Amino acid sequence: MKATGFISLWTLVSLPCGQLANPAEHEDVVKHAIKLHRGKGAVITQRKQWVLESCRKLSGLLRQKNVVLNKLKNAIRAVEKDAGLSDEEKLFQVHTFEIFQKELNESENSVFQAIHGLQRALQGDYKDVVNMKESSRQRLEALREAAIKEEMEYVELLAAEKHQVEALKNMQHQNKSLSMLDEILEDVRKAADRLEEEIEEHAFDDNKSVRGVNFEAVLRVEEDEANSKRNASKREVEDDLGLSMLIDSQNNQYILTKPRDSTIPRADHHFIKDIVTIGMLSLPCGWLCTTIGLPTMFGYIICGVLLGPSGLNSIKSIVQVETLGEFGVFFTLFLVGLEFSPERLRKVWKISLQGPCYMTVLMIAFGLLWGHLLQIRPTQSVFISTCLSLSSTPLVSRFLAGSVRGDKEGDIDYSSVLLGMLVMQDVQLGLFIAVMPTLIQAGVSTYSSIFKEILRILILIGQILFSLAAVFLLCLVIKTYLIGPYYRKLHAESKGNKEILILGITAFTFLMLTITELLDVSMELGCFLAGALISSQGHMVTEEIMCCIEPIRDFLAIIFFASIGLHVFPTFVIYELTVLLFLTLSVVIMKFVLAVLVLSLILPKTSQYIKWIVSAGLAQVSEFSFVLGSRARRAGIISREVYLLILSVTTLSLLLAPALWRAAIMKCVPRPERRSST
């Protein structure tokens, strides 16, 4: 009888799920389950009775479910044939029956999945962590799928409820005559329903089966408010507007980007509070740095440190703040290009092209040498060396803001050389971002595929060079035929109204940014070229546009430097201060020495004196190392420890940069020019 009970239970389980195991194995599984359920001291007769009762209950439930399903099918056919029901009533009733059918089938499926999971767990080795991890992952996936199905069922119930309301309204309208106002409102209601259906994007249903999409468990967090009664209604409104925060199991936080109902205006109050807080705290921090003789941008970085994760942790929308800060970089480089005319660019283009390339090659060579001595992987050595070879364009642009740019006869202006080399480094940044996937693959590739990887890198370099040629050809066409008439039209339309001029210049900058991005060149280069093209229209044009754009640049630059401070961790720097100071000084000295060596080889003899100033401007690490480091850490190129070291060395090098720059200016620049350069 015992074997018969086991076989009956196994037959019921295997009907919808397929053959999971043979009867002998299943008998062992059930024996283990009985021991877990009843205990080792249970008598044999009780075990037999428990098996028989369980089989009867499960068999009875399955038969009852089949009977109910047949009744539901008959009911659906009867509703569809009933001519006395309206279309809305038919839709509501059929929808309700179908939901109940799905509920029965899902409940049955859950039972068999649970039995299958129990069998898999009992067959596993409790000492094998990998096996238990895989079992846990499978259970997690099953729970996620169950949650998604339950969510879809809930949405269908809401739709069914809506159909029920529609049916009741139609019945009421049939029983009474409507006034003219009621008819108008009814037409408006139907039009609003059609509008919602037209603009609604079924993003969830469209993307849940896309490759690479995973189901995740998230927490929905409402705002913690002190006055619960006053803010209860506020939380209800936020719940309706979808402005609460979602947190996944990896502690990533998400906010609403696109609502389901696009007819209701929304605002991210977290982001608004963050920008307001940064704006208010930046003022005293900037004043403090001005008082002690430091550039104001360090006050903005301190503001980000105080408000960021290492300080008060009051910034909630970190990604949004960083995104807005990127526009500060765009407008800073636009103004740099506005002061950097194409004539100067042609004068130093050879130095601008050769200098950064030589420095990057030398940095990579030194990095591979030290990596070999310290037994660091070549891919990691190449990444770290390339990352540290870049210098900060926004920082140097602030150093050069307002400095005298007059060249001596036959000499080369140091600002032109420095900005030209920085722009070329921005191009290298775009190239390096494009090559990063190859570095990731190289970390796991065998020696047999090295030739393919080298070929792929050469192809990428060829694509970048082709894109650069296309960009500069386009700039030549724009300068010759388009930029002059475009600006004259803007100037004519903006008399007495600077709004058109600002909008026109901004649109042109964003157009150049978009073009360079589409051609796989850095967006920063597009902003720089936009300013350089406009500067070709003359000094008066440059002055007029600069007066309009500078206030926008200054505000967005505050956000940018504050966003850098969000990634500065003073506690880590204090704990490892000795190591970090040694690494930072080593990087700064190495970059300075390499820059002096390279510039000594490529500068004309009459301009050798500027190599000290240019080298001082290049002797720091670009803030884009934050971006590259985060990407490399996610890709597994570098470890968490190396990532924190890169962040700290970058921050300390930026803090040392003003002192080194000021020392170079004091030594090499004549006194009349020095006053305006500093």
Image: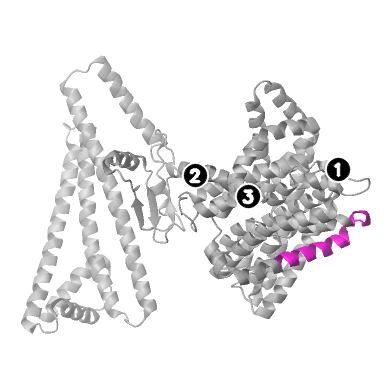
Identify the mark nearer the N-term, 2 or 3. Answer: 2
State the CA–CA distance, disc 2 to disc 3: 19 Å
Disc 1 residue type? Gly
Question: Which residue is drawn at the image coordinates 80% and 41% (left, top)?
Answer: 341
Disc 2 residue type? Thr
Q: Please, what secondary structure does the residue beneath circle 1 have? A: loop
The residue to which callout 3 is attached is: 289
Q: Position of residue 671 (x, y in %)?
A: 84, 48
**Which label sits in the foreground, 3 or 1?**
3
The residue to which callout 1 is attached is: 406
Q: In the image shown, does 296 or 490 lie closer to the viewer? A: 296
Q: Please, what secondary structure does the residue beneath circle 2 have? A: helix
Identify the mark nearer the N-term, 2 or 1. Answer: 2
Cβ–Cβ under 8 Å for marks 3 and 1:
no
Residue 129 placement, left or right of 552: left
What's drawn in magenta, residue-wise?
587-608
- Residue 325 visible to the viewer: no
The residue to which callout 2 is attached is: 277
